[in-house]
Image: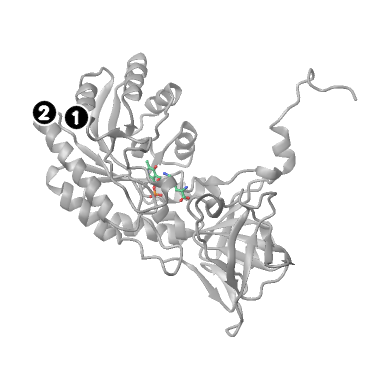
Amino acid sequence: MDYFSYRNGQLHAEDVALAAIAEAVGTPFYVYSAATLERHFRVFSDAFAGQPITLCFATKTNGNKAVLALLAGLGAGADVVSQGEMEHALAAGVPAGRIVFSGVAKTKAEMAAALEAGIFQINVESEPELEALSEVAQALGKTAPVALRINPDVAAATHDKIATGRKENKFGIDWTVAPAIFAKAAGLPGIAVKGVAVHIGSQILDLDPFRRAFERLRELVLALRADGIALERVDLGGGLGIPYHRDDPASPPPAEYAALARRIFGDLGVHLVAEPGRLIAGNAGMLVSRVVYRKQGETRTFLILDAGFNDLIRPAMYDAFHDILPVTAAAENAVLTPVDVVGPICESGDIFARQRPLPPIAAGDLVAFATAGAYGASMSSTYNGRPLVPEVMVSGDRFAVVRRRPSVAEMTALESVPPWLAKQA
Ligand SMILES: Cc1ncc(COP(=O)(O)O)c(C=O)c1O
Ligand SMILES: N[C@@H](CCCC[NH3+])C(=O)O
């Protein structure tokens, strides 16, 4: 469920017309619905009611401070993958005690920062990382609360670039060698082995791969307990998918996902951690853009937008589908014509949709990309000298700019030319 709908022929986020936001902040911009974020988070947390659990929103999905603050206010923690994300989450008000640090390449500096901040858990993904963390913790006189991320060798039906649980992927410790690494971890100074973690990939619409991965984790927990290593936490990772296209299957209901986790881990008496991202934020955001030109090519019609793949890279990177909606509703009897929807970037890959049947849309009109709240703004760049676009939060009939558009002067001021480089012409 989301809170984007047409009213009086105008697309709204909650009670605010997108056209009014465009008027105020210019285009392109991202817009988020606070009510949608809240509802999605509550549905997920309600599904686990009664179960000791830390719900860590994956901040790579949408790291906007207002988004993180809203979720933190509902009790969310954060799954972070860099010192930058960690400091940003702390600045947004996420308590350190609800932060999990994931990622394959944590540097010693990042480990030290995580230990100084006193976060809930560091998810270690390899033996060398474990050794490095032990060294850093000892040097600081601290003990690192650790989960080992296991690679369960489970293939999930998703895009190849975002499947992370197969043995050929760089993530996690192979489940076959995990007992030995746990035994080593248990004996390392500065390391407190708290649990086991997994994350098999993203945009997964079927619960079965989760079941297979969780069952592997359960076997591991039991085997380790038999060896005297008592794990008290299981981190389920993220990965629940959402429908982008009307023909996509619905998201697996969080209640069924929670029931699966309870069925597999319920009798172990463990504290669970979950790291949902897309499920919370995906349908809570749209990217709004203006048509700059409608161009008639020899074989195609192009709708050329003021948003490009630097603003929303998912179509170019994963051939992802995003619904494209006219902000002013089309007439009921409007004829749909196939058009190529493209951006301004100087690459042919800057294309959002090929031969998409759309109602009449002219230069100057606004369009909205649906389901852009996850991996939209967070993956954007300034390629082609394009400043990152504003982000706007709507709640009821209010809206606020929660990330302003930097000026080109600010971008230019970040760079400098050393005097010894500049030549006299
Ligand atoms: C370790 C980890 N946790 C959580 C997530 C969030 O995944 P999703 O947005 O699919 O829920 C990701 C991204 O896939 C991840 O790499
Ligand atoms: N960026 C990907 C998801 C990656 C998940 C990262 N662990 C997407 O847009 O679908």
Q: Quadrant of the C terminus?
A: top right
Q: Position of residue 180 (x, y in %)?
A: 20, 26
Say which of 346 and 72 sits in front. 346
Residue 71 horizontal side relative to residue 236, left or right: right
Most distant residue in the right direction: 425
Ligand 1 appears in which quadrant?
Answer: top left
The tally of labels here is: 2
Dot label at residue 227: 2
Q: Residue at x 54, y 69 (%)?
A: 15
- Identity of the residue furthest to the bottom in this view: 333
Q: Residues within 10 Å of mark 2 (few under 14, many from 20)?
A: few
Q: Residue furthest front?
A: 299
Could one spot residue 187 in this view of the protein? yes
CB contact under 8 Å: marks 1 and 2: yes
Q: Distance from label 1 to label 2 (Cα)?
A: 9 Å
Instruction: From the viewer's side, name the closer residue of 142 and 104.
Output: 104
Percent of width and height locating residue 227? 11, 28
Of mark 1 and mark 2, the one earlier in the sequence is 1
Residue 414 lies in what quarter of the image? top right
Image quadrant holding the N terminus, namely: bottom left
Q: In the image shown, does 330 or 271 lie closer to the viewer?
A: 330
Identify the element where label 2 is drawn: loop
Q: Is residue 57 left or right of residue 187?
A: right
Residue type at tag 1: Pro
Name the residue tied to disc 1.
Answer: 179
State the SS at label 1.
helix
